[in-house]
Image (tube, helix red, strand yellow):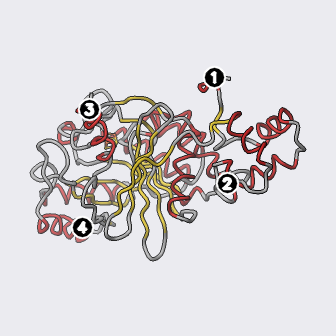
Amino acid sequence: MSQSDQQFLAGASQEALQLFCNEAGVPPFRARQIADWLYNKLIVEPEKMLNLPASLRLALKDFFRAPASRVAEKVTANDGTAKLRLELFDGESIETVLIPTPERMTFCLSTQVGCPVGCRFCASGAHGLTRNLYTGEILEEFLLSSIEAGQRPDNLVFMGIGEGLLNFAEFSRALEILSSPDYFAFAPRRITVSSSGYVPGIRKLTQMKKEYNLAISLHAVDDEMRAQLIPDPLRYPIAEILAAADDYCDTVGRQYTLEYTMISGVNDSLDTAKKLAAIAMAHHAKINLIPLNQAEGDFRRPERRQIEEFERTIAAAGARVTRRVERGFKRGAACGQLRSENLMKGKRDE
Ligand code: SF4
């Protein structure tokens, strides 16, 4: 079997594991043992599945991609937040972030290698899309992050590299496997799907009828302002995005969040704050402010006073607003920056 024909062990069904056991000539209970390692103990490396015979562990590695990714780099901030650069089977890279707080552990996961949306303030979009992630690769992010963290996470947020809804087939399958009681049994309410406002994808997510949290990266209060930040081909009108998100909220029964990256002189005036509050209240949405990481191009982060006044203005208008807690990374703080640094290093070494 060629490597590209092999399926990933992460996400393998009971039937696939039974088939493997048949071919390996071992009793069916071995399939249940393997599923227990994967879906209860979160172990994807056959060599760690200690109650299997050594020959079966080797056969598993032959039959499946197990795992196809590896942790190539880890950067830890002074508050314990850790960023992993995962190297994929074809040498490409993605990132995951492990975010501990006293109350909970959150993983931020990627859905694509690079991103086709190309938001002008984002390191992940700067190099365009290389390829979609397979379902198995998305699940390996979850599994490898769990091993690094030494625990199962409490929350999953798909806010890493990529626009997951543009990789709907693989991403939605990963969501199903994560939340299915037959696999990882992760409560949909503890999973957040972030979108740059890709309307056809939001509509498809609505059809899944699962209680995932939806986060819309709005970043602007009108289409003209948004056009400065997100290039044409994949940018939808704000009215269409909000209509799709409202339908999601009505169908699924979950309030959604408007993510708002604050950029100095572009979208951080107090008049804009009032308009943003009005949009959020009209659509029963929450606002999450994300002051820009000083990472890309000509865009600058607002001064601290401006960020605080912007937040106060929204709250005074009566909208629900939070601000993303910032992590003390010395390097690679922005989403996609480790991958970006690695790409540039590769180019320098050529
Ligand atoms: S902000 Fe999100 S959607 Fe925009 S380019 Fe970056 S990863 Fe893609």
Q: Tag 1: Cα neighbours inside 10 Å, few (<14), some, or many (≥20)?
A: few
Q: Secondary structure at mark 4?
A: helix
The residue under label 3 is which amino acid type?
A: Asp
Of pointers 4 and 1, the one earlier in the residue sequence:
1
Residue at numbered disc 2: 48
Q: CA distance from mark 3 to mark 1?
A: 30 Å
| Quarter of image, res 20 | top right
User: Residue 2 at what x, y percent from top left?
Assistant: 63, 22
Q: CA distance from mark 3 to mark 2?
A: 35 Å
Residue at numbered disc 4: 317
From the image, which quarter does the C terminus lie in? top left
Of pointers 4 and 3, the one earlier in the residue sequence:
4
Residue at numbered disc 3: 349
Whether the residues at callouts 3 and 2 have beta carbons within 8 Å, the answer is no
User: Residue 137 at what x, y percent from top left?
Assistant: 54, 40
Q: Tag 2: Cα neighbours inside 10 Å, few (<14), some, or many (≥20)?
A: few
Q: Is residue 336 above or below residue 4?
A: below
Q: Tag 3: Cα neighbours inside 10 Å, few (<14), some, or many (≥20)?
A: few
Q: Considering depth in this image, is 330 or 157 the residue closer to the camera?
A: 330
Q: CA distance from mark 4 to mark 3?
A: 53 Å
In this rendering, position of residue 342 left or right of residue 45: left
Of pointers 2 and 4, the one earlier in the residue sequence:
2
User: Residue 341 at what x, y percent from top left?
Assistant: 27, 42
**Which circle, 2 or 4, is nearer the viewer?**
2
Q: At x 21% / y 54%, what residue is drawn?
A: 292
In this rendering, position of residue 32 left or right of residue 184: right
In this rendering, position of residue 137 left or right of residue 23: left
Q: Secondary structure at mark 2?
A: helix
